[in-house]
């Protein structure tokens, strides 16, 4: 375990905190753009915003998703290397189990989700994009499979949204109600209470 100022306030290692907030921003961006795509559909987007903006929305969505995948792999490595800091105030067992379950599921789904998006895109014959780069499709074209995978992409997307809302609510509860230093394990300011 590697903690910053552990004697004052146990925290995640700096790299873990940076990657956490980068992933959080990218996932919110991917959900917002994916939700817009899901809401309007491809043709609806083109009618409402025009072809160029539609292409931009798809490109940014895919790029955010690919970056989530890359950063999650870095994040797993950092977690294996640094572990997790101790809690300043021990959590009640039910809260600890709930937190560990949500964190575990988020780790899993934030790796599975971009892989499904990548696979569905490649199977549909569409480009897998990271900004201006076209990445290798890696998976063979298969239209029926692509449709099934996009349906799963939607289901897993809604699941991630629900988990993220629970995660954010819990963080706010620890910060404003319990005031037990749990949120500060992941922040950058002064480690003092
Ligand atoms: C954490 C990562 C990701 C999240 C949270 C996410 C989320 C979403 C959501 C919520 C939708 C709307 C689904 C619907 O309502 O039908 C969507 C659509 C889509 N996603 Fe992702 N996505 C991620 C990664 C990726 C990646 C890596 C790719 C491809 C490289 C990708 C490609 C697509 C495409 C092409 C659509 C549109 C499907 C259609 O036109 O029906 N996504 N995504």
Image: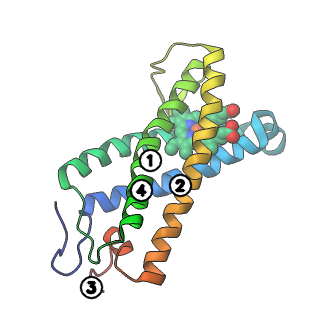
Vertical comparison of 122 with 73: above or below: above
Circle 1 SS class: helix
Position of residue 61 measured from the top left corner of the image (x, y, whole percent):
58, 42
Cα separation between marks 1 and 2: 8 Å
Question: Badge 3, how many Cα within 10 Å: few under 14, some, many 20+?
Answer: few
Circle 3 SS class: loop
Q: Kindly tell me whether mark 1's CB lies below 8 Å from ligand 1.
A: no
Question: Badge 4, how many Cα within 10 Å: few under 14, some, many 20+?
Answer: some
Q: Which residue is mark 4?
A: 22
Residue 105: mark in rendering? 1
Give the label, 1 or 4, closer to the camera.
Answer: 1
Locate residue 182: give its quadrant: bottom left
Give the label, 4 or 3, closer to the camera.
Answer: 3
Question: Which numbered disc flags the more N-terminal residue, 4 or 3?
Answer: 4
User: Are the two marked residues, 1 and 4, in contact with CB atoms closer than 8 angstroms?
Assistant: no
Locate residue 157: give its quadrant: top right
Position of residue 145 measured from the top left corner of the image (x, y, whole percent):
61, 18
Locate residue 40: give its quadrant: top right
> In this rendering, does residue 60 appear at all?
no
Question: Badge 1, how many Cα within 10 Å: few under 14, some, many 20+?
Answer: some
Give the label, 1 or 3, closer to the camera.
Answer: 1
Q: Which residue is mark 3?
A: 192
Residue at x 27%, y 58% (from the top left corner): 15
Q: Which residue is mark 2?
A: 163
> In this rendering, does residue 46 appear at all?
yes
């Amino acid at each position: 375990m590697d903690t910053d100022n552990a004697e004052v306030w146990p925290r995640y290692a700096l790299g873990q905190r940076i990657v956490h907030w980068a992933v959080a921003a990218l996932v919110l961006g991917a959900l917002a753009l994916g939700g817009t795509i899901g809401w309007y559909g491809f043709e609806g987007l083109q009618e409402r915003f025009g072809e160029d903006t539609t292409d931009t929305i798809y490109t940014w969505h895919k790029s955010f998703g690919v970056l989530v995948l890359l950063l999650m792999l870095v994040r797993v490595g950092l977690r294996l290397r640094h572990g997790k800091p101790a809690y300043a105030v021990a959590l009640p067992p039910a809260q600890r189990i709930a937190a560990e379950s949500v964190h575990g599921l988020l780790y899993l789904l934030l790796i599975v989700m971009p892989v499904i998006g990548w696979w569905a895109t490649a199977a549909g014959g569409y480009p897998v994009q990271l900004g201006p780069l076209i990445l290798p499709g890696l998976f063979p074209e298969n239209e029926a499979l692509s449709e099934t995978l996009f349906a799963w992409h939607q289901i897993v997307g809604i699941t991630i949204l629900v988990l993220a809302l629970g995660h954010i609510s819990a963080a706010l509860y620890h910060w404003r109600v319990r005031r037990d230093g749990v949120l500060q394990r992941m922040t950058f300011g002064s480690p003092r209470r």
